Image: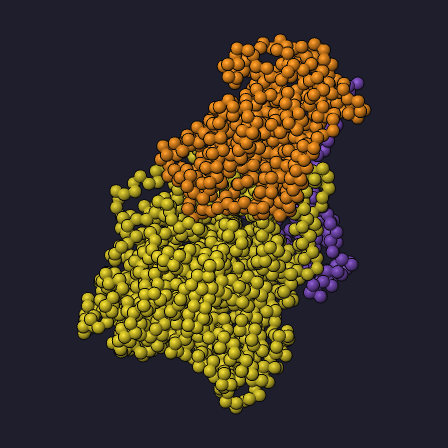
Amino acid sequence: MSAGDIPITTSPAVAPTDLVQPTRWIEGSPSLHRITTDIAQPMEARPGRGWWICFGIASAALLNLLGMVTYLFAKGIGIWGLNNAVGWAFDITNFVFWIGIGHAGTLISAILLLFRQKWRTSINRSAEAMTIFAVMCAGLFPLIHMGRPWDCFFIFPYFPNQRGPLWVNFRSPLVWDVFAISTYFTISLVFWFMGMIPDLATLRDRAVGGIKKFIFRILSMGWNGSQRTWSRYEIVSLVLAALATPLVLSVHSIVSTDFATSLVPGWHTTIFPPYFVAGAIYSGFGMVLTLLLITRVTMNLQRYITFNHLEAMAKVILLTGSLVGYAYATEFFNAWYSGNVHERFHFINRATGPYAWCFYLMVLCNVLTPQVFWWKRARRSIPVLFVASILINVGMWFERFVIIVVGLHRNFLPSAWGMFYPTVFDIGILIGVFGLFFTLFLLFIRALPMIAMWEIKGVSHD
Amino acid sequence: MKVRVIVIGFAALGAGGGLLARGATRIGVHQGYAPEQPIAFPHKIHAGDNQIPCLYCHSGARTSRHAGIPSASVCMNCHGLIEKQTTEIQRLKEAVQQGRPIVWNKVHNLPDFVYFNHSQHVISGVACQRCHGAVEHMDRIEQAAPLTMGWCLGCHRSEAHVPTSTFARVAKNVRDRPTPFAGEDCTSCHY
Amino acid sequence: MNRRPACEEAETAATAIATGSPLVQIGLPTGTRSTGFEASRRDVLSLMGFSLGALGLGSGCRAPVQHAVPLPAASTEMVPGVPNLYATTCGACSASCGLVVKQRDGRPIKIEGNDASPLTRGGTCAAGQASVLSLYDDARLRGPVWLGNPVSWEEIDRHIKTMLNAGSGDPRAVVLLSQTITSPSALAVLNDFRVAFPSFRHVVYDPMSLAALREANRLAHGAAVVPHFRFDRARVVVGLEADFLGTWLAPVEFARQWSRRRTADGERAFHVQCESGMSVTGSNADLRLAIAPSELGPFAVALLAAVARRVSDDGLAGLRGAGLAPDAPHAAAIDRIADALARHRGEALVVTGSNDVATQLVVAKLNALLGGVGKTVDLEQPSLQRQGDDAQVADLIQQMNRGAVRALIVWGANPVYDHPDGVAFTAALKKVPLTISLADRRDETGAHVRALCPDHHFLESWGDAEPVRGQFSLRQPLIAPLHDTRSGVESLLVWAGRPTDHRTRLRDFWQRELHPRALGAGPFEGFWERSLERGVVEMPQPAVAVHAFAGDWQGAVRDIVTRGGRPPTEAYELALQETVGARDGRHANNPWLQELPDPITRLTWGNVACIAPATAAAQGITTGDVVTLTTEVGKLELPAFVQPGQERRTISVAIGYGRWAAGKAGDGVGGNVFPLVRVENGLRRASAPVTLSKTGRRARLAPAQTHFSMEGRDIVQTMALGQDKHEAEHEHEHEALPNLWRERLHGAHAWGMSIDLDACTGCSACVVACQAENNVPVVGAEQVRKSRIMHWMRIDRYLEGDGEDVISHHQPMMCQHCQHAPCETVCPVLATTTSSEGINQQVYNRCIGTRYCANNCPYKVRRFNWHNFTANDDFPFNMTSPLGRLVLNPDVTVRSRGVMEKCNLCVQRIQLAKNQALLQRRPMADGDVATACQQACPTGAIVFGDLADAQSRVSKLLAGRRAYRVLEDLGTRPNVGYLKKITSKETT
C-alpha cells in the first residue's frame, strides 16, 4: 500500500546508536488483522474499570464547570478575584494554557508528516484529538471572561448591522485571536477527520450493529480502498499538512501579541512569539505524554505506543524545555539591558515580589524538570516520564499566570498597585475545564480509533 | 441525485442564514409602532388641515432635549374658544377640570444610552418630518423611521457639509441660518 | 441595559410638584410608571441576555410600552430637560458657604459653589457636594413622631403646646440645645420664643469646640469672638493643630485665601504646620513639625519667646528663661519660624485649634506682637461660627438631672452621640418631662426623646446665614418637601404661639432688620429679589468693640510652664481629628462620604488609630492589628494604621464614626471616639492621655491605595521656588518625543485640562463632585477591599521619607485623555476611541467588557462594573433605592454590569455648552464649560478648556514652564497636564 513506498529514514530524534538497525516502532510483529482487532478493541469491548473511574471524575468536574459558568453568567465576573489593578488572571491564563496544549497535535500530524517521521504514526491520532478538545476548552474563555458575554457577537465583523455599519477594531490583537483560533480549529478538525476516514471505513466494515454501521457509513464518506482513492488521499493529506504547518507558528505567535503589543511591563517584549510557540509545543507534548501514558495502560496498547515513542517525545520535551528556559533568561537580560525603570522593576518584582513563589515554581517545573531527560534511563522510565509530564503542565500554567498577573498587579503608578486573590469560582472553573477536556478525550477513545490503524500498518513490517 | 441533495442543502443553509441575518438586524427596531392613545389626537387635523406649527405645541423642541408633549392647558388655549365638541375633546376637558395629567403612550423611544437633543436639530434646520415622517397626514402617530444608529449616521454623514476640523461651521452658524453641525463622534450621542 | 432616568419619570416629578401631590411619589412612582420602569429594565436585561436566542426568533421581541406624562398646566419656569440654577446656602456645616444648585425637572441633582460669594468664590467641600444625596436619604423621617407613633403635625403640636404652656410661670427652664446657629433670622426667632417662655435658654455646643479661643479673645481684647482669620493677607502662616485647609472653621474659604498667597512667584507665603496627626493642612505645609497636643502650650510659649527676642519692643525678652521649657521641642525649627514671622510683621498669622485658654492667650499675644490684629486677625468683623460654650452643656446636664428643665428641644445637634458625656446626657434626658428632637432622622438622641419633629433638609427650606459678620447669604428651597417635614423655625414659631410660615418670617426679618442697613439697596422688593437671585449680600455691620491686647499673658505662660510639657515618655496621647469625609459625623449615612477615601490615609468606610512608624515598630503593631485605646473615661477598639508623619507619642483617631442610629450606610462603621475625652473645667478636650494595647485580632481595612512610595519615578514633579523663572531650564520640555503613530489632528476643539499640583490640597471636593455629576456608583467596603472602587477621579497620595518628617504629595488622577491612547488600540470593538475633539470617549453600549483597555492603561484610571451596582440588593446604596435614584443626573447614562467606564471630561457639560452656543448663535468662548471637578475646587487648581484655542487659560498654563505630563516618555500624549509643585524651604 501507498505508505509502503515512503523511503525508510531514521528519526533525527533517535539516538545515533539506533542508526545501525532501524528503530522498530511496534513491539513484536503483529499481523495486520491483529493490529485492527487490537486497536478496534477499546471501541468494541466493554470499557474497563480504569476507564470508568477516569470518566466518573472527569464528568463530575465537567458538571461543576457547567454549574459555575451558569452562576457566572447570572452574577457577572465580579464573582472572580479580578479587580481594577488586575483585569485578567485565571481566565486568560487558562485560555493561553489550553491554546498551548493544542499545539502538539498539529505539530505531530503536520510537521512530522512532512518530515516523514514514522514514530508519529502511533500518537498522531490522539494528539490531534487532544488538539481539538484543547482548543475547545481554550475557546471557552474569551467568551466567559467578557463582562457582557451576550454581546460577544460584537467581536465578529459582520454586515449588515444596525450600527452604521460599525466594524471591529482590526488593530486589536483580540480580533486577530478570533481569526487565528477559528482558523486553527477548522484546519485541525478537518485534518483529524481526514486522517480517520480509512479507519472509519475499516470500522464500518467490522461493525455489526445496524445503527453503528449506518453512522460509520456516513462518516467514512463511501471510502473504498482502491488505488485511486489512496493516491488522492495521500495528496490531500500532504496538502492539508502544508496548510496546517504555518498555523503551528501563527496561532501562538498571535496569541502572544495580546501581550507583546501592549505597553505593560513584562508583556511589552518582542521575544514573545517564538517564546510562546516553544512553550506551546513544550506544554503540548507534556499533555500528550500524560494522556498516552494513561491510555496505553488503560486501553492496553503498550504494543503500539512503545518506549521508543515515549523516548522520542522526551527528547522533544528536552529541546523545547531548554528553549523556554533560554527565553526566561533572555527576558531578564533584556529588562536589565534596556535600562527601562518599569521593565527592571517588573522583573525584580517577579523574582522577589508577592508572587515570587509562582515564578520559582515555574522555573523549577519548566526549566529544571526536563533536564532529567539527558539520561536515557529517565527517558524510558514510565514513572519519571509521568511525573515530569505532570510537572510540565503545572509549570506551563504558572508561566502564563506569572506573565499576566505579575505584569498587571504592579506597574506604572504605584498608587494603583493591587493584588489578585483567586476565589472559589476561579479555581472551580480551572478544575472544571480539565473535566471538560478529559470527558471529551475519554469519550473519544471509546468512540473512535485512537491510533491510526492504516498508518501503523504502514510501519509494522520494516 | 447526490448533487441535488448537496445543492438543496446549501440553498437551505443560505436561505436560513439570510433570514437569520435579516431578523438580527430588525431586533429592537419598532418602525411602524403606532399605539392607541388615551385621547385619539389627530395630528392630521391640527398640523395638517389647520396648519398649526409643530413648535406651537411642542415648544420644548426649541430649547430642550425633549420636544415634550404639550400640557392640557396648552390645548385649552384653542379649545377654550372652539365650540366643536367631540368625546375626545370632552375627555381632554375632564382632564383639565380634574387637573390630572394625561398619560400618553410614547411612540418614539430611543434606548436609555442614547442622548438625543431636539433643540440642537431644530436650530440646525432639520425638519421635524425627517425623523417623524409626514405627521400632518397621520391620524394616529406612528414611528416612521427605524431610529437605528445607522439611520442617524446616514444624515450625520451626508449632512456634514463643512469638515469638523475647522471653526468654519461654527462661524457659519453665527453668520447665517445655522447649517447642520453633524458630529460623528461617539460622544455626540453616547455618554 | 444602561438606565438613564427617563424623561417621563422626571415629568412625573414635575407633575407632582406642580400639583403639590405628596412628593414621596417621585422616586416611588405609582401605577403605570413604576411597573413601566421595572418592566423595561427587566425586559432590556433579558433582551440583552438572550439576544443570541433572539437571533433565531428574528424580530420577535417588543419593547415595553413607555409613557409620557406632561404637566397638567404648563410651567413657565420649568421646561422638562432644561436645568435651572438657584442660589442658596449650604447646610452641611456651620460655614454656610454660598451655593448654586442645579435643579433638573424639579429636583436638585448637583451642588455647585456660588462664584458671587466673596468668601468662597465658588468653592465647595466634599461634605457640601455630598449633601444633595442626604436629601434623598431613606433614613429620613417621613413625618412627626410622638412617643414612637407617627402622628399629624396638628396632634404633635397639641401635645407639645399643652406641655409647654401647662407650667406657664413654671420656673423650670425651657432649653434649646443646638450646635452653632449662623442664621440671624433663626436667632431672632429664638427671641420670640424667649418672650413666650421667660425661662427659655439657648445652649450651644460644637463637637470640635473653640470655646477657649473666644474666652482668650475676651481676656485679651475684651470681645469673646472667633476672629475672622485672613490667610490671604499673611506672608507667613503658622498653624498649631488647626486643620484650616481641611476641616477647621471655614476650610473652603481658608483654602481659597491660602492658595491665593501660594503663588509660584516671589510673593509666595510660607506655611508652617505643627500638629500631632497628619492632616490635609499639614500635608501641604512648606514646613511641618510633629508635636504632641501636650507640647502645644510649651511650643507656643517657646515661639512667643523666640519672636519676642527678635521684635523685643517690650520686656518680653526676659521671659525667654522663664517660658522656654528646658527641653523645648524643635528649638532649631522654632528659631527658623520666629525669623520668618519677625521678618513679616503685620503679614504674619498664627492660628491654633487648641481648646486651652492659656495656649490661645499666648497665641493671641503672638499675633498682637506680630501686628496681626486688625490685619490677619479680624476681631471687628469676626466669624460667627463655633459659638459653642462647653461649660453651659455640662451645666445643662446637671440641671436636667436636678429636674430644673421642663422642656428640652434639640435642634441640629446630636449630643447623645457626639458629646463626651453622651451617656450622662442620655440618663439626664429621662428626667426631662418634654424632650423634642428636630433632627431629620431618629438619630442617637432622637431615640430617647418624646417628640420627633423632623426639620426640612436645607435644600427644601428657606433660611439665611451670616457665617462672618456682615456677610449674609440666603437659602431658598429647591424642591417641595419630599416628606411630611416642617422647618424647625416654623415649629418653634408654632410652639411659641406665633405660627408663621418660614418664608414670610424670613422676608419680614430681612425687611425689618437687614434692608435698612443695606446702603443704597433701593426699595425692598428689588433688594429681596436681587439677594435671592445672587444668594449672597455684603452688608457692613457695626464693628465689634475691641481694645489692644491687654491679657495676662504672663499668667498664661506661667500656667503652661507649671503644667509642664508632655507626660512621662511611656504614656501616649490620644488626639481627636476631624477628617474631610466624616467631619463631625452628621453625614454618617451618606455613602458618598463614607466611600470617599481620606486624603491622608486613603481609607474608606471607617476610622483607624493612626500610629507613628517608630512606635508601631516598638510595639510590634502593623497596619490592621486591632488595638485597644483606653483613657480614664472610656475605651475603644480600633484597627491600627501606621501613619508616617504621625507624632511618635500620639495616636490620632478620626471623629464622626461609630454611629448606631444614622441609617443603613452609616451604622456601625468605625468607632466613636468622642466618649474617650473629657470636659475639663468647662472646656472640651480634643486630646487625652491614653494607653495602647494589642488585642491580637486583625481587622480588614478598606483602602483605596496601598502603596505610598513613588519608587523613584517622576510621577509628581516639583521645582524649587523661583526655578520656573530661569530661562535656561526645562528648555527641552514639550518638544515632542518621536512617535510611530500618525499625529492626531483635532477638530473644532481639543479639550484639555491643567491640574496645578501646587494648588491642590487634596481636600477631595472634586472626587465627590465627579461622583455626583457622573452617576458613579457606591460599591461598599467589601468591593473597595478588592480594589474595585469606582471613582473616576482619585487623589493619589505619595510620601517621601518616613518617620515623623515626611513630604507628602496629592495628585488628582483621572483619565488623561491620551491622543495616542493605549486603551484605544486594544479594544476589539471600538468601544473606546478618541473623538475629533480630543476626548477619549468610552461607549458603554458598545463595550463587551474584555478589560483589555484597563490592563493597557498606564494610569489605571479605568473602572469596570464588576457587578450590577444599580440593581443588586448586595449594594444597598442610593442607586438601588427608588428615592436615592432621584439624585441621578438624567444627562449621564447609568452604567450596567460588565462595562468599562472612566472620566470623559464631563462631555455632557461640553455638549450642553456647545448647544447653548449654537442656540445663541455664537462661537464657544473660553470658560463656557467647567467640569464638575473644576467647579468644585476651592483653590482653582483645575482648569479646563480648549487647547485648540491658543488664548485659552488651559493652553497658556500647559505651555508654561511648570507644565508636564505624567509618564510623558510613554508617548501617550495626554490632553491632561499637570503643573509642577513648588517647594519653598524658606520665606522670600
Label the purple chain with its letter: B
Identify the chain drawn in orange: A
Vertical placement of C798 versus B102: above or below? Answer: above
Q: Kindly identify the residue that appears in the image at 62 percent across and 65 percent down.
A: C23
Q: Which quadrant does the C terminus of chain C fall into? A: bottom left
Residue B94 image-quadrant placement: bottom right
Residue C814 x/y as whole percent: 45, 48
Q: Nearer the viewer, residue A150 or C614?
A: C614
Residue A240 higher or lower than B21, as above or below:
above
On screen, C27 above or below A321? below
User: Residue C301's spot in the image, x, y percent?
Assistant: 26, 70
Q: Nearer the viewer, residue C691 or C948?
A: C691
Which residue shows up at 39% across the image and 63% down it? C651
Residue B186 seen from this side? no
- Which residue is rendered at x = 49% and y = 30% of the image? A369
From the image, state the color of chain C: yellow
Observer-nearest of C869 and B143: C869
What is the basis of the colouring in this image?
A: by chain
- Does residue A219 appear anywhere in the picture? yes
Spot occupied by residue C3 in the image (x, y as percentages of width and height)? 61, 51
